[in-house]
Image (cartoon, grey):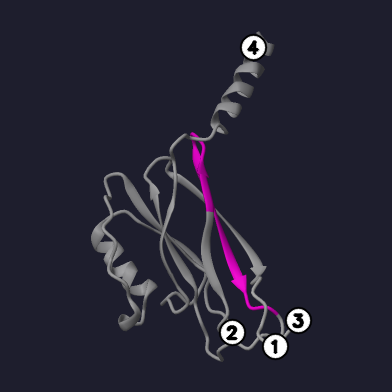
Amino acid sequence: MKAIGILAAGLALLAARVPVIGWSAVELGSSVRSAWTSPRQIIYSDSAAFRRGWSDLFSTASMRPALPVINFNALRVLVVAAGSKPSGGYTIRLDSARATRDSALIYVSLRTPPPGCGVTQEITSPAVAIAVPNVPKRLHVITRERPDSVRCTGHT
């Protein structure tokens, strides 16, 4: 009887790790001048809150794209903010995402400026907005920091 319980627990764990077919995440937009000065993850589940969040994502009104139309019955919006950075050259983007039965893994890359490259001398605050399905409820964001692979002009 004990072996059956262990087998059942093992099968339940395996089933929880099976990818959900057809599940995807879509990057809605990213900005290097968001209003969020500390790292954070924010989930928006309604259009009024998302409208305010979109204004915070693109804190410079003249550079703000049109607000995407989101069906909040099926989707929610996750914002991943990297917090203040000491200069330009930092960006954050969605790499990939996948869901299992009980959670979703959202992989984002925080690109840093390559050493020796010229960057703007201003404090920036990169952030990205990502539309994800409402199910599964639990989201795990994995941020990978990596140098930008673009070479500087004049450097080899």
- Residue type, mark 3 in image: Thr
Going 28% across and 54% down the picture, which residue do you hit?
Answer: 70
**Magenta run includes residue 100:** yes
Q: Which of 66 and 48 is in front in this view?
A: 66
- Residue type, mark 1 in image: Gly
Q: What element carries label 4?
A: helix
Going 51% across and 82% down the picture, which residue do you hit?
Answer: 124
Q: Mark 3 points at which residue?
A: 156
Residue 154: numbered disc: 1
Q: What is the distance, in whole Å, between disc 2 and disc 1 at their CAs?
A: 23 Å
- Residue type, mark 4 in image: Ile
- Residue type, mark 2 in image: Pro
The quadrant where residue 116 appears? bottom right
Q: What element carries label 3?
A: loop
Going from the N terminus, do you reach mark 2 or mark 1 first?
2
Going from the N terminus, do you reach mark 3 or mark 2 first?
2
**Magenta run includes residue 113:** yes
Going from the N terminus, do you reach mark 4 or mark 3 first?
4
